[in-house]
Image (spheres, rainbow, N blue to C red):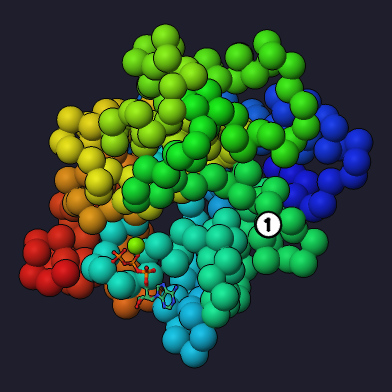
Amino acid sequence: MNMNLNTPTETEQRMDVYASSGYPESDDHLDARDRMRTPLTGDTDEEPRPTEISVRGLRAGYGTKEVLKGVSMDIHANEVTAIIGPSGCGKSTFIRCINRMHELVPSAYAKGDVQFAGNNVYSSSVDPVLLRRKIGMVFQKPNPFPTMSIRQNVLAGLTLTGRLSGSEANTIVESSLKEAALWDEVKDKLDEPGMSLSGGQQQRLCIARTIAVKPDVILMDEPCSALDPVATARIEDLIAKLRADYTVVIVTHNMQQAARCSDRTAFFLMGELVEITNTDRIFTAPKDTRTEDYITGKFG
Ligand SMILES: Nc1ncnc2c1ncn2[C@@H]1O[C@H](COP(=O)(O)OP(=O)(O)OP(=O)(O)O)[C@@H](O)[C@H]1O
Ligand SMILES: [Mg+2]
């Protein structure tokens, strides 16, 4: 599953966006993903899924403050991995390290091994811009581009890839909005501003924008925290569907949400990973008493 994340040649840059932004995936990788499209049974004895991202000894922080103190965990392909833990324990920092958004903060540092697609993402040859296309991110507060229409928002991440024909653009807009479960609500008003949508619709628009560049992984940092229960339920339904085609990592403060929509859950505490295991197991029989104390509301 090697994939070139290094700076592309000019020829590669001109390649069609449909071809995974020009970065060929080996057949191995595709077969693995295809095999994983079966529904989960919740049976904890089943074969683990292939690892999409492998984190080893990740240390990260801001200036002299160390926030992640050597985190090691695997993120499985085509699963939803939930990250829970008290405020300030480093959940957002962790997911931002995975696609190198963390380093956009001026004082930020990160060290360790984050293997994705055959590369350590911190290797000097990895282009962070390309990496962020393969590992997209959805934020807490929906952030459509305020001056852009719904359609332009979906296409926003593709403009760097080169010119698209009108029909290619239409196809991407429709398929991305369908995958984000928003198409039926917006198909007759694609030229209206993205900001004219409700909060829940805006969040699905942001998911469509992320999907449009054909990522392998979608990181979501509390994607429902600004939404009402109905909009939250729609996003949760969507997350469950997305795992057929993508690997999803979701940070959430809502334990019911983790229980409802994730396959595995990681519990973080003060910059350390306390445990990661199947979601049904972590909420019924956690191994560590600190996990039990947190999920039963003794602290946090
Ligand atoms: N830009 C920054 N500059 C300095 N320190 C930061 C910055 N961002 C986060 N921190 C610090 O890093 C620690 C971890 O923050 P992080 O945002 O990763 O936690 P979190 O688990 O996502 O918390 P929350 O649940 O509140 O979102 C906190 O102590 C926070 O104050
Ligand atoms: Mg956070």
Q: Is residue 173 above or below residue 203?
A: above
Residue 290: percent from left, percent from top: 20, 72
- Give the residue pinned by disc 1: 128
Residue 228: percent from left, percent from top: 17, 38
- At 49% from the left and 80% from the top, the residue drawn is 62
Kindly indicate the quadrant of the structure image that contains residue 24: top right
Of residues 110 and 269, the one drawn nearer to the viewer in this rendering: 110
Whether residue 283 sits left or right of residue 267 in the image: it is left
Whether residue 237 sits left or right of residue 7 in the image: it is left
Q: Which amino acid does label 1 sit on?
A: Pro
Kindly indicate the quadrant of the structure image that contains residue 181: top left
Q: Is residue 294 above or below residue 146?
A: below
Q: In which quarter of the image is the N terminus?
A: top right
For the view shown, which residue lies furthest in the bottom direction?
A: 64
Q: Quadrant of ligand 2?
A: bottom left
Of residues 44 and 115, the one drawn nearer to the viewer in this rendering: 115
Residue 274: percent from left, percent from top: 32, 70
Whether residue 189 sits left or right of residue 53 in the image: it is left
